[in-house]
Amino acid sequence: MFSILIPTYNNLEYLKVCINSIRKNSKFNHQIIVHVNEGKDGTLDYIKDSNLEFTFSDQNIGMPKALNKASKLSKKDYILISHDDFYYCPGWDEELINNVNSINHKNFYLSSTMVGAGQVSFDAGQTVDTFDENKLLNNLEMIKTIDFQGTTKCPGLIHKEIWERVGGWSEEFSPTGGDDTDFAMKLWAIDIRIFKGLGKSLAYHFGSITTRKKDKSLFTYLGNRGNKIFSRKWGLTINFFEKFYLKSGLDKNKNLILTKYEGPLKNPSKKFHYYFELIKVKFFIIYLILINFKY
């Protein structure tokens, strides 16, 4: 069914949980492709012993380049973009496939709902050592939420032809930060308007483990850098694009906005508030030009 692309960087214990959950909780058979960054923690040996398909780099090349390398091995019609710190819950793939079948064309971006460090709060443990699988599975019906509008997050499903048409993940965002919203913008630019998060397809997320385990401030830095790259590239900020075009993003308290899915998105209504916010965006872009920000 899917070619599941999983970049990993010395994150073996989480990767094992991720792959085991795919094998255990998927209704259909999928192609798992891992990109191993460095792998000095035993990841490379584990991948080989598990007979998994993989690509390899001897240093960390970041998520965009890793995804693009792994995608070259794809043999399926659909590509699923994944992190290595997901636990895929039972039924996750069936719900995605049901939606693919109901849409009946290739122009969409679908995602599962991230539970834990994601769109829905639920604590089943923040690390592999504290992960309570039974607690999570016993509460799945309670956790399930609405289908929501404007998703840009992983696990994300895209038709392989669309992936190739937009050139995969944009490598100028390497190692990460802003790359997911950039991918959504590339889809928007070719008139894709279905960005749908599925409330009954769940993946527990331990939460940017690879990025944060080295330096918590790195996560913030990469996000800020990604927004600057996005702004110079597209003439809009990430927040502006998500708010006015995707009907998603963050509220004033930095909480994720989940708006009920009501069909394909339309071009934004360009009223006073739109133009007022756009002016602020343009001043920000002028600032980036004045400081000679490059990527």
Image: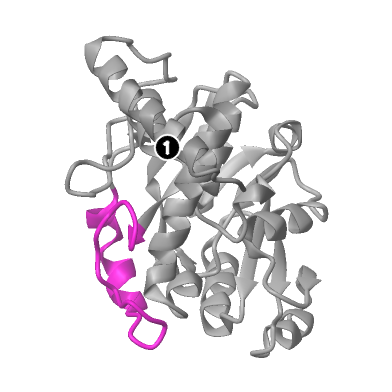
Which element is circle 1 on? helix
Residue 279 occupies which quadrant of the picture? top left
Against 231, is 71 above or below?
A: below
Question: Where is residue 34 drawn, in percent x and y?
Answer: 70, 67
Vertical side of 119 occupied by 207: above or below? below
Residue 163: x %, y % from top left: 70, 38
208 to 49, vertically: above or below: above
Q: Label 1 sits on what residue type?
A: Tyr
Residue 119 coordinates in the image, percent (x, y): 31, 51
Residue at the outermost left position: 253
In this figure, which residue is indicated by the disc labeled 1? 287
Tell whether position 182 is magenta: no
Q: Residue furthest front?
A: 290
Q: Which residues are magenta?
A: 115-144
Seen in the image, is 89 located left or right of residue 11?
left
- The answer to whether any part of residue 287 appears in the image is yes
Q: Characterize the local packing of mark 1: few (<14), some (14-19) or many (20 or more) Cα atoms within 10 angstroms.
A: few
Most common secondary structure along the magenta stretch: loop
Q: Quadrant of residue 7?
A: bottom right
Q: Nearer the viewer, residue 180 or 282?
A: 282
Count of numbered circles on the image: 1
Query: Is residue 246 something one can see in this rendering?
Result: no
The residue lying toward the viewer, choosing from 237 and 25, is 237
Residue 130 falls inside the magenta stretch: yes
Q: Is residue 72 left or right of residue 239?
A: right
Which residue is at 76% across, 46% downward?
76
The residue positioned 51% from the left and 73% from the top of the image is 210
Residue 190: x and y in percent read 63, 21
The quadrant in which residue 97 appears is top right
